[in-house]
Amino acid sequence: MPGLKQRAIELYGWFERRIGLAGPITEAAEHPVPSSSASWWYVFGSAAAVILVMQIVTGILLALVYTPSAGEAWNSLQFLNHDLLLGWFLRALHGWGSNFMIAIVLIHMTQVFLFGAFKFPRELTWIVGVFLLLMTLGMAFTGQVLRFDQDAYWGLGIGTSIAGRVPFIGAPLVHLVLGGPIIGGTTLSRFFALHVFVIPGILLGCVALHLWMVLHLGINEWPMPGRLVRKSTYVQEYASITHKTGIPFVPDAAWKDAVFAAAIILAIIASALFFGPIGPSGPPDPTIIQTAPKPDMVFLWLYALLAYLPPKLETPFLLIVPVLVIGGLVLLPLVAGEGEKHWSRRPVAVLMVMMIAVSLGALTRLATYVPWSPIMDAWSGDPVPPKFLERRTPLEHQGALVFQEKQCRNCHALDGVGGMRGPELDAVATRLTEDQLIRQVLQGGGNMPAYGSALSPPETTALVRFLETLNGNRIPARDPSRVLIRKSETVLKPHNESLTSASQ
Amino acid sequence: MKIAILLNGIVGVFLAIPIIGYLLGPLLKKDSSYNYWTPLGSLDQFPVGETRLANYHNPVGVAWDGQTGTIPCWVRCVATGKFQVFAINCAHLGCPVRWFPQSKLFMCPCHGGVYYQDGARASGPPLRGLFQYSYKIAGDQLMIKAGELPTLSTQASVAKPEHSPCQG
């Protein structure tokens, strides 16, 4: 056996003499890192790199079968999902890998920001990281398009509608994105090229640069309150920390990265197994208009934002804010390259992270139940709850029919069921008087269309009678002038019906 | 060495011009060449006073468009020989609007844009009414000028509807 071992060493020596990489690789692996940096907080970057490798491998495997043709892409996904052994699992791994990738990249970015790692001399590492984030989002969007289904088709429509808002170059931009004047065969082909060649190529180049800079400059030390970064002294201070407390990256620090990466890959596998592949939804057939397109989870916040922004602010917002945000992120290390690193001394930084996280979280949550979208089949699918129909006159029943038939329910809920675009109407009669109801129905306003041309006078009367019964067992709203008139009528005709029953 | 750099520069430019031309090809067409008169169906499919869904085949498509080559639109026959042909795409972000004949409204499922029967904006985030195709009648066929995805900046053939905010 010693002979065999000797042979193996000789063989290794033969290759190493010609390649000569073992030395630099070992040196890089064993380079000293501050012992404080061998922390569980420092594992996210390497986890993102591991997911990237998984995405590349699963992506290549999917490309063995996927057909990047507008006419066949959807069918090839169905084939992957249903006909090919474990095709569904590979699709699920790639889809969930994408979700985890974005989550980990965002966590990594937050950690790096809160630990002040973007400060001197690691400014460029951060800036390259910002581009990596943008390219990760680019991969998510182009990947969503490659899942050439209904959502992808209309998602492209949304994307180009945004591009079409750019002043002066809007039209050419739309044509450039779509590869022609309209969504079709050339569109999918160019998104395939972007997703498989262009963005991954740039992404890998940036990852290499990002990693090289981490090695070259050393990993950020654990920040200490009061230990300020100064360009004149930092390099020396870092060298002394590494010298005093340094431990070899492999294995003393890297084992945590390895354990976390394994846990993340395991989580992706588990998600893939439990939740299965993401889509495809219906075929990319624009003639099927019974659809409510929705973007993937990563872009849900944007979908929500576009519902809540005042319409006139949308275009400026869409065009200016991304430039400001990206510009801000790129300039951050150049503006704040020195000073305090520790989060406890950077309240604005902590507050910003919290604010952004809460905003994105809240918008994403809202987009899961889209309160701003009319429920297109509520008028025919959700009957008026019986409690609103008991002890009602025929006219009021007729009004309930009008209420359903004219699609009011698509935007207005009754008893919690129906659209949330407009207010729930369970107790509308306590808010609006008869006259106000008539005016609102006929003329619209406050984001409600006018129904004047869609309602005949008898329909309007019936509808308003029905709406007046929706008082939630509280006192209905009354017009004071009406009350006065009724009072005077009561005085004049004491045998008339009472005021309460009159207003019912 | 300088000559070598110059030579490579010249070759580079020669190579770059066709590459850039190829990439920007979709932009260099004139707007008019995107849209062609396309048949939508015979006139008797569109009764007066009704708004109906019609499909046309994308005149500027390619053979591998698949299902994306057939595009829907809403046809409103206002009076005999008088039509309004609305793009399916909401003027907000391009989602497919649906027609509800009972309430005489187009509603968008995405962000709740609503339009009246004449395409005018009724409520929600859209800044304008529905996009309209130019139409003409050839024999018993209704033709529209189509080919380009209507967005706020690509409306070469897409006329703005007359604005009539108050229907009451």
Image: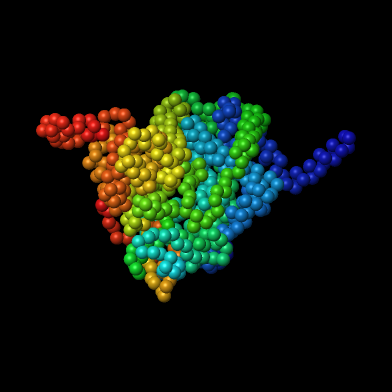
Q: Quadrant of the C terminus of chain A?
A: top left
Nearer-the-camera pick, A484 or A111: A484
Query: Would residue B3 be found to the left or right of residue A307 on screen?
Result: right
For residue A499, above or below residue A134: above
Q: Residue A344: image x %, image y %?
A: 44, 25
Nearer-the-camera pick, A47 or A202: A47
Q: Quadrant of residue B139?
A: bottom left
Q: Residue at x 61, y 34 (%)?
A: A267
Q: Residue at x 75, y 44 (%)?
A: A16
| Any part of residue A235 in sight | no
Q: Residue at x 34, y 34 (%)?
A: A391
Q: Residue A157: image x %, image y %?
A: 46, 54
Q: Quadrant of residue A427?
A: top left
Q: Residue B103: image x %, image y %?
A: 35, 51
Q: Quadrant of the N terminus of chain A?
A: top right
For residue B120, above or below residue B61: above
Nearer-the-camera pick, A397 or A33: A397
Query: Would residue B144 be found to the left or right of residue A274 on screen?
Result: left
| Any part of residue A355 in sight | yes
- The colour mode here is rainbow
For residue A95, above or below residue B51: above
